[in-house]
Image (tube, grey):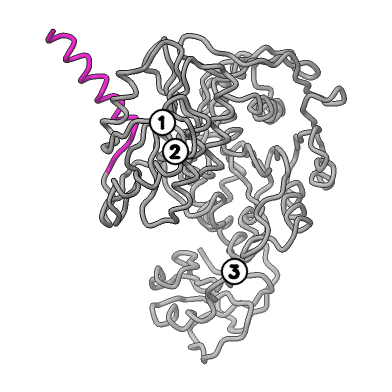
């Protein structure tokens, strides 16, 4: 593709008027090869302009800059100057990958909490209709049964456009993305007109450091999404919804408020046959009575957001009901079916606050016993271990202490620190250092009505020991344990 074809939607000045054929659009100088266009991005700790000379030496045919360069660019290299190279990268990537968003149904979700769960719910609803959907967010880029890890919740614009093109090639017809405030601030979603934008909620987070200077900026960045959406849905029970969606063209509201377009009522917790979740009914634009297989009443809001999102596309009520009933988020209070008599969940909670949130939610289900299996990461502050032990001791009926990414520390030293926290409580606990053995202990000693939480690993599929990451997926360990138990039963 010719350079000027990539620049069609960008305001720029040509400093070296050439129009070379561009092989690829690159923003990491280490990846530059002959014929590439190198876009100089300015980050928190690095400046791409400092690597422009290296990019030229590696064969770049064009440079896209916002600042002056400190070297003389060869005459055979095109130089494009623009005010915002991040915006330029986004708009160039749109053209380079052939405007993939125009071939997909696209939904973006923003909000402080609930983005990942709502994304999973929407994707599952589409799948129930036979519409393959790809997702981009906290868990990475997911489509076709594969997950590709990313550094950020909302990746760089080039990666988003590339992912959408790959999704299309894999047969996807829809894409749902978590739109973080940082991603919006840095134009990573620029160039996409979303079919729907969703606002979940807003609270004090991501303030300071390299993120947002204050709450006002955080809110403003969230609101940027709704300048590029055909339709919008917003949580009317959040007082910030009007400010965040003020630039939206068509806003549908959801919540418990009588003024909501989609209203929830009669919500209550579900617990039966080893399955826990929440049930509710809706009125307004939809009259539904769905079950959600993810615990916690707050998931009613996530389900309302998902229902609102798909309502713009005429999705059938049956698909919504079925999708919500089986939707789950990998590593987020993720149910793994083991028995009808007790519940087994995998969760990423790996600090005291996240553990407290999960265990408090599960306490609401009045389990026979709440059993929490967890460890703590090595080469991390010891106070985190004390706090985790204390929280589990207070909220669990039984804590099962084990390993979790011990890194360069001795597992038993880490466990001893956790025991220090547990000692501040009356909580019962056992120590099972090997994680598979600990899971086996939980399963084999479960009683009717128990809820077991395997905390700490979540979506992670490795165990880090002495600088080496060994493959370890708790779902696989559970399957192995069940197979081993069945084999032993047959031998008896």
Please tell me which residue lies in front, 26 or 240: 240
Specify the quadrant of the image occupied by residue 457: top left
Q: What residue do we see at 43% from left, 35% from top?
A: 455
Q: Position of residue 464 (x, y in %)?
A: 31, 50
Q: Where 220 falls versus 145 (above or below)? A: below
Q: Are marks 2 and 1 in contact (CB under 8 Å)?
A: yes
* Nearer the camera: disc 2 or disc 3: 2
From the image, give the main secondary structure of the stretch colored magenta: helix
Residue at the image point whose x is 75% and y is 40% from the top: 230
Identify the residue under disc 2: 422
Label 3 vs label 1, nearer the camera = 1
Q: Which residue is at 62% across, 70% downward? A: 85
Q: For mark 3, what is the residue? A: 4
What residue span does the magenta drawing correspond to? Answer: 471-492
- Camera-nearest residue between 119 and 168: 119
The residue furthest right is 259
State the image coordinates of residue 342 (x, y, percent, origin top left): 42, 14
User: To which residue does mark 1 refer?
Assistant: 399
| In front of the other: 34 or 254 | 254
Q: Residue 216 location in percent, x, y?
A: 79, 56
Question: Is 480 situated left or right of 137 in this image?
Answer: left
Q: CA distance from mark 2 to mark 1?
A: 9 Å
């Amino acid at each position: 593709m010719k350079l000027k074809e990539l620049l069609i939607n960008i305001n720029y000045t040509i400093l070296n008027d050439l129009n070379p054929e561009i092989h690829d659009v690159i923003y990491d100088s280490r990846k530059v090869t002959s014929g590439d266009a190198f876009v100089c991005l300015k980050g928190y700790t690095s400046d791409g302009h400092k690597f422009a000379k290296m990019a030229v030496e590696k064969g770049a045919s064009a440079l896209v800059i916002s600042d002056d360069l400190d070297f003389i660019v060869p005459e055979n290299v095109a130089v494009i100057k623009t005010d915002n190279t991040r915006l330029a990268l986004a708009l160039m990537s749109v053209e380079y990958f052939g405007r993939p968003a125009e071939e997909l149904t696209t939904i973006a979700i923003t909000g402080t909490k609930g983005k990942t769960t709502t994304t999973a719910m929407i994707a599952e609803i589409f799948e129930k209709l036979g519409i393959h959907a790809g997702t981009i967010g906290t868990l990475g880029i997911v489509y076709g049964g594969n997950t590709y890890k990313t550094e950020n919740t909302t990746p760089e614009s080039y990666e988003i456009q590339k992912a959408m093109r790959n999704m299309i090639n894999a047969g996807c017809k829809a894409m749902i993305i978590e739109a973080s405030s940082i991603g919006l601030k840095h134009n990573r979603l620029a160039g996409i007109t979303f079919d729907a934008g969703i606002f979940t909620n807003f609270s004090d987070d991501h303030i300071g450091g390299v993120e947002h200077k204050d709450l006002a900026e955080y809110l403003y960045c969230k609101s940027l999404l709704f300048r590029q959406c055909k339709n919008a849905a917003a949580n009317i029970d959040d007082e910030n919804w009007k400010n965040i969606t003020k630039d939206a063209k068509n806003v549908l509201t959801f919540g418990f408020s009588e003024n909501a377009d989609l209203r929830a009522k009669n919500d209550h917790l579900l617990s039966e046959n080893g399955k826990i979740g929440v049930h509710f009914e809706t009125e307004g634009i939809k009259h539904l009575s769905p079950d959600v297989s993810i615990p916690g009443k707050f998931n009613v809001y996530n389900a309302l957001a998902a229902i609102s999102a798909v309502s713009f596309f005429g999705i059938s009520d049956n698909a919504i009901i079925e999708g919500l009933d089986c939707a789950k988020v990998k590593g987020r209070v993720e149910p793994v079916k083991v028995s009808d008599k007790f519940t087994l969940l995998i969760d990423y909670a790996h600090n005291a606050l996240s553990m407290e949130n999960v265990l408090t939610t599960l306490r609401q289900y009045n389990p026979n016993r709440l059993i929490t299996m967890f460890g703590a990461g090595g080469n991390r502050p010891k106070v985190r271990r004390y706090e985790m032990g204390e929280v589990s001791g207070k909220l669990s009926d039984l804590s099962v202490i084990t390993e979790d990414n011990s890194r360069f520390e001795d597992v038993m030293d880490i466990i001893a620190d956790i025991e220090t926290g547990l000692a501040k409580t009356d909580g019962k606990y056992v120590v099972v250092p090997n994680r598979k053995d600990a899971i086996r202990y939980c399963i084999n000693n479960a009683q009717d009505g128990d809820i077991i939480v395997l905390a700490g690993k979540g979506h992670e599929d490795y165990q880090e020991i002495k600088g080496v990451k060994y493959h370890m997926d708790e779902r696989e360990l559970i399957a192995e344990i069940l197979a081993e138990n069945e084999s032993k039963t047959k031998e008896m």
